[in-house]
Image (tube, coloured by chain):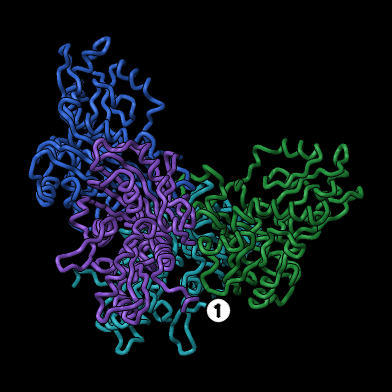
Chain colours: A cyan, B green, C purple, D blue
Amino acid sequence: MWQETSVLFPVLEAEFRSAELIVFSNAKNYRRDPLVPLIVPLINASHFAMVPHQRALHSPPLKKGFILTNANCSTTGVVVPLAALEKAFGPLESCMITTMQAISGAGYPGIPSLDILDNVVPYISGEEEKIEWETLKILGGIAEDDNGQKAFDMHSRHPLRISASCNRVPVIEGHTECVSVRFARRPPPSPQQVREALAAYTSDAYALGCPSAPRHTIFVHEESDRPQPRLDRDYQMGAGVSIGRVRQCRVLDIKFVVLANNVAIGAATSSILNAELAVLKGYIPSVSAE
Amino acid sequence: MWQETSVLFPVLEAEFRSAELIVFSNAKNYRRDPLVPLIVPLINASHFAMVPHQRALHSPPLKKGFILTNANCSTTGVVVPLAALEKAFGPLESCMITTMQAISGAGYPGIPSLDILDNVVPYISGEEEKIEWETLKILGGIAEDDNGQKAFDMHSRHPLRISASCNRVPVIEGHTECVSVRFARRPPPSPQQVREALAAYTSDAYALGCPSAPRHTIFVHEESDRPQPRLDRDYQMGAGVSIGRVRQCRVLDIKFVVLANNVAIGAATSSILNAELAVLKGYIPSVSAE
Amino acid sequence: MWQETSVLFPVLEAEFRSAELIVFSNAKNYRRDPLVPLIVPLINASHFAMVPHQRALHSPPLKKGFILTNANCSTTGVVVPLAALEKAFGPLESCMITTMQAISGAGYPGIPSLDILDNVVPYISGEEEKIEWETLKILGGIAEDDNGQKAFDMHSRHPLRISASCNRVPVIEGHTECVSVRFARRPPPSPQQVREALAAYTSDAYALGCPSAPRHTIFVHEESDRPQPRLDRDYQMGAGVSIGRVRQCRVLDIKFVVLANNVAIGAATSSILNAELAVLKGYIPSVSAE
Amino acid sequence: MWQETSVLFPVLEAEFRSAELIVFSNAKNYRRDPLVPLIVPLINASHFAMVPHQRALHSPPLKKGFILTNANCSTTGVVVPLAALEKAFGPLESCMITTMQAISGAGYPGIPSLDILDNVVPYISGEEEKIEWETLKILGGIAEDDNGQKAFDMHSRHPLRISASCNRVPVIEGHTECVSVRFARRPPPSPQQVREALAAYTSDAYALGCPSAPRHTIFVHEESDRPQPRLDRDYQMGAGVSIGRVRQCRVLDIKFVVLANNVAIGAATSSILNAELAVLKGYIPSVSAE
C-alpha cells in the first residue's frame, strides 16, 4: 500500500472511528484536521496527546476510536532532520527543499513510462503544498484556543518559512531531497556540529522499544556522493533516513542531501510504527487485557 | 565535443594564441584567467572588450591571437535568466540552485550505467564551485586595477550570493535546474512580471545577427509541468534556454525551473556563437579582406 | 498517431469507405479481411491489385472508396528483410523472431513506468500472433477462389513457418528484432550474399517516386554492435529499416538483427507512403482532374 | 564479485592449485581445459568425477589441489532447463537462444550509461561463443581417449546444435533469455509435460543438502508475463532459475522464457555451491578431520 489512497477512504475512515476502531492512515484526508495528529513516528510521537481531545470532541464522545495520520512521503524525509536540528540548535528560520522523487510515489499505474524514461518532470501536483503545510503541523506544538479546546498550534509557534520544488525522476524507490536551512540562532552551528547532532538523534519510537523502529533514526554518510537511492534505500529496511553532504550554504546556513524510502518510512512503515507507538503508549488496550 | 576537454589542451591553447590564432574554448583551463573573457553568448557579449587588454598584456603583444572561453554547461543554463532578471529588475541579492544534470555532461565513457540506472547521484565533482564562481565572472563587469590595467571586477560589483547543489540523474541530454532568487529591490517583481521580462529578453547575439543564435533566447512555458528535458531540449536546436513554473518562493522571492541543452548551448553551440560574435564585432578579420 | 487505434474506429472506417472515401488505416481492424490489402509500402505495393475486387464486392459496388491497412509495428520491421531475401534467394522455409520492443509501441499512457524501468516484460498481448499471421498475408500472393473471386492466398503459396517471441524493453522508440531464417534453397546463401542482397533491395515506393520513401530501404551495418535503437532509429527519418550482424546460424541458416522505427515506418509513415503509392498508381484521382 | 575476473587470475589459479589449494573459479580461464570440470551446480555435479584425473595428470601429481570452474552467467541460465529437459525427454537436437542481459553482467565500470540508457546493444563480445561452447561441455559426458586418459567428451555424445544471439538491455540485474528447443524424440512432449518436468526437476546440490541450494531448482511461472528480471531475480536469493511462457514453437518444438540472476547463480552463488558440493562429496577434507 505505497500510494496515498485518499480518494477511496475518507468516509470509511470516519465510520471506522465512530465504531470505536482505531485508524492509522497513510491517506491525506485527515492530515489537516486540527484534531487529528499527523505523526512522523521518528519525531513527533508527543502528538499522541491530541488523541483524548479528538475522542472527547467526537459526537458522541469515543472511548477507544480515533484517527491518526502519517505524513506524505516527501514530507517525511525532510521533516526528520529538521526536527533533529531544532532539538539540537533551536528554531529554524527558513528551509529550501528540492526533491527528486521516485516513480513509486505515484502509485500504480502511476507515471506512464513515456513520461519519465530519459526525463525529469519538474512538477508533482499538490506535493509542494503538502510539504510546506504538513511540515509546520508536524514541527508545531499543541495549544489551547479561546474556548479552552486544544488544537494544533502551527502559526504562533512555527514561523518557519519553507519553500519546496518537487520533481519526478526515473528512480523506482527512494526520494532524494536537497535541503538548505537557516537557523534563528546566530552564529549557526558548523557542518560538523550538524553532522554530530543528526547522527546522535534518537527517535522516541526506538527509545520506547517499537519493534519496527530503526536503530539509526538518521544515518549520516561521510562519502561525498551519498546517499543514493539505489544504494541506500533499503538500509534498515527503509525505516530510517539517510543524510549526506552536510556543508555550508552561501545563501542560508547549512545544506545537505536527504534520502528516505517513500514506500517504507514514507508510507506504511510509518503507519506500523504509529500503531506500535499506540500500543506502547497505552492508546490501544493490550490484547491480553481484553 | 560535448565534454570539457580541459585536461588535454591548456598548453595547446596557449601555443595557438601565441601563434596569433584565435581560440574559442569550451574547456575550463582559462575560465578563471582575469584577462580571458568567459562569455555566455546569449548574455555577456560585452566582455569581448577584454580582448585588446589580453592581446596587449601578452608577451610579446599580439595582433590577432586571443583566447576566449565559454562557461560550464550547468552555469550556462542558470546564468541566462539571472542576467535577464538583472537587466529588467536590477541586482540580485542571492540565488539557490539545485541541478538535475544529464549523463552526457560527463562525456564518454563518463558515468558507468551501474551508477546511474534507477538512481540519482547527489554529487558532481567541482560542479558546484564552477557554478558559484563562473556566474559571478559572467555577471560581473570590467574595471581598472591600481596599475591602470583592466581586468574582470567581480567582487566590487557583484555581491550576489550563490549556493548550488548538483545532482546527476538518468537523463541523456538536458540539464534541469530549480532556481530561486532574491532581488535587492523591494518589493520584488511579481511572477507575471518575471515571466514577461524573461520572454522579452533578446540576446546581443541574435540582435547582431549571429546565424546560430536562437530567436527566443528564453522560451517561457505556461504549462505547469514544463520544461522537461526529453520534450524541450531540442527546441531551437538546443541553442536557447527554456523556463517554466515561475512562481513565488516563500524563502527568497521568485523560483522557477530552467532547462538548457548541455551538449548544445551548454557546450559547442556557445563556442560557435562566440566565434560568430567575434566576426560580427570585428575581432576576426573577414576572410575576403585578407 | 503512433498506437493502434483499433478499438475506436472499425465502424468509422467502414462508413468512410461506404461514403466513397479512401481509408489508409494503421489500425488492426481490417488487416485480416480477405479483401483488404495489408501493405508494407517498402515491399508489397503489388497488393493494391486487390482494390478493384474490394470495390466490386462491396454492396453497393464502389467507384472510389476502399480501405487499405498497413501492418503492425513489429511485423513491419521483420517483413522487409524477409521479402528482400525471398526476392533474391527464393522462398524461406522457416523464421525465428525475438523482439525487443519500445514502450512507444503501446501508445499513451501505455506501459506504467513501474512495470518497465530496470525491467523486461517478456510478453505483449496479441503481438506474437500478429507477427505470425500478418507476415504470411504480406508475403503471400493473390489467387482466385472456387467462385472466381479473388482473395489473398496465403496458405497454398506461403508455407513459411514463423515463430515469434515478443518482449517489451525500456527503450522509447525503435523495435529491435533478432531474426533467424532458413531458406528452401540448398545450399543457402552466405552471410556476404545476404548482406549484398539486403543492401541492394529497392522498394517500389522509392522506384515509383514516393516523396516519403527512403533512399535505402534497408541500411546494412558493418559494425559488430549495430543497429541500436537510440543511434539508428532516426536515420532517414525512420522510414527505412536497419540491419546488422548478418552471420551464420547453427540451427537455421542465417541470423541478423533488424531495427525499425515503430512510430515512423512501423506506423504513420507507412500509411503516408501507402497514400503516396495510391496517388502514383492512380487509385486516387488527382485533385487537378476533379 | 559479479564479473568475470579472467584477465587477472590465470597464473594465480594455477599456482594455487600447485600449492595443493582448491580453486573454485568464476573466471573463464580454465573453462575449456579438458581436465577442468565446468560445473553448473544445479545440474552437472557428476563432473566432479574429473577431479582425480586432473590431480593425477598434474606434474607433480596432486593430493588435494584442483581447479573447478562454473559457467558464464548467460550459459548458466539456459543450461539448467536444457539439462532438465534432457533428463525427462531424452536428447535435444537444436536450441535457439536470444538473451537480454543485464548491465551488471559486464562488471564495473562496465557499460557506459550513454551506451545503454534508452537503448539495446545487440552484441556482447564473445558471449554467443561462450553459450554455444560451454553448454556442450556442461551437458556432455566423460569419456576415455585413445591413451586411456579420461576427458570431457563433447562431440561424440552431444550433437546439440545451439545458436545464441546476445543483447544488452538497460536492466541492472537478471538475464532474460528466450529459448526454443527441438527434441530428438518424435512426437515431442507437450507444453504441459514440459512445465511439469521443469517444475519437478531437483538438483543434486539440493538433494545432497548444500546449504545454499534453492528448494526450487526451476520455478515455473503460470502468469503470461513472467518471469521479469525486476520482480523475480531475488526469488530464493537468486539461487534458482525462473521459467515462464512455456508454449509451442512453430519452427522448433517448444519455446519458453528463462530468467537467471547473473550476479547470484550466474556467478558467485555457483562457486559457493560448487564448494559446498566439494565438501559433501568428500573432495575437501572436513576441517574437523584435519
Task: Decide: few, some or many residues near mark 1? Use Cα within 10 Å; few <14, some 14-19, many ≥20.
Answer: few
User: Image point 59% across, 57% down: which residue?
Assistant: B261
Q: What is the x, y in percent for residue B213? A: 69, 61
Query: Mark 1: which secondary structure?
Result: loop
Q: Looking at the picture, which amino acid does disc 1 mark?
A: Ser
Residue under pointer 1: A156
Rendered image quadrant of residue A93? bottom right
Q: Is residue A246 visible?
A: yes
Q: Is residue B7 left or right of residue C263?
A: right
Relative image position of residue C62 (x, y in whole percent): 31, 78
Residues A222 and D86: in front is D86
Image x and y of residue A51, in percent: 36, 77
Residue C195: name its quadrant: top left
Q: Nearer the viewer, residue D161 or C47?
A: C47
Residue B212 or residue D218, whichever sits in front: B212
- Total label count? 1
Q: As drawn, which residue projects farthest toward the top?
A: D60
